[in-house]
Amino acid sequence: MALPKSLRDIERLIGTEKTLEIVGAFGGQKLTIPSRLNDDWLLLPMLGTELGLRLIDFCGGSQLRIPICKSEKALTRNQQIMADRANGLTLNALTTKYGLANTTISAILNSKQKSTLSESSLRVAS
């Protein structure tokens, strides 16, 4: 998954999972990165000491704009929907869990099936 350019250095420092966690919690906001680690820093519980120190070493004393990353969030959500379906969740359970219409969930699941069929037909044609 390709994050926006503004987050790629952060992703390399703290990893994709933690970067996406920050985007999910603070997308669209500016976060102040302290010059020194302190116990009341907003990101400390999320990152822990080691990753927090990496981020402070990289951009401490500055403000970090966190993009919303709609397409990346949707891709992650769609992958989770497909995994939940593969694990036996019903269409109605998926709509309740994700707050999406049945038609939207169906379209997400069908797009996965179509891409899987396309990939397998390409392998057969090779």
Image (spheres, rainbow, N blue to C red):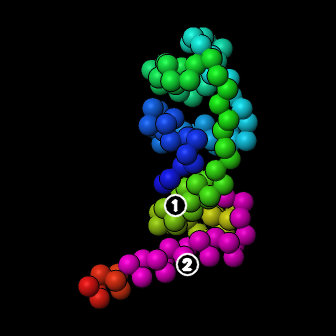
Residue 108 appears in view: yes
Residue 106 within the segment the image draws in magenta: yes
The secondary structure that dominates the magenta segment is: helix
* Residue found at x 54% / y 49%: 3
Q: Which residue is mark 2?
A: 110
On screen, residue 74 above or below 12: below
Total numbered labels placed on residues in the image = 2
Mark before the other along the chain sequence, 2 or 1: 1
- Tell me where residue 14 appears, x and y as whole percent: 47, 32
Identify the amino acid type marked 2: Asn
Between 96 and 46, which is closer to the camera in this rendering? 46
Horizontal and vertical percent position of residue 68: 68, 47
Q: Which mark is residue 79?
A: 1
Looking at the rendered structure, the secondary structure element under dot 1 is helix
Magenta residues (range): 98-119
Say which of 76 and 10 sits in front.
Answer: 10
Residue at image position (62%, 58%) is: 71
Spatial distance from mark 2 to mark 1, Cα to Cα?
Answer: 12 Å
Find the residue positioned furthest to the left. Answer: 126
Determine the image quadrant of residue 119. Answer: bottom left
> Is 42 above or below relative to 14?
above
Relative height, residue 69 to residue 17 (above, below): below
Image quarter (top left, top right, bottom left or bottom right) of the C terminus: bottom left
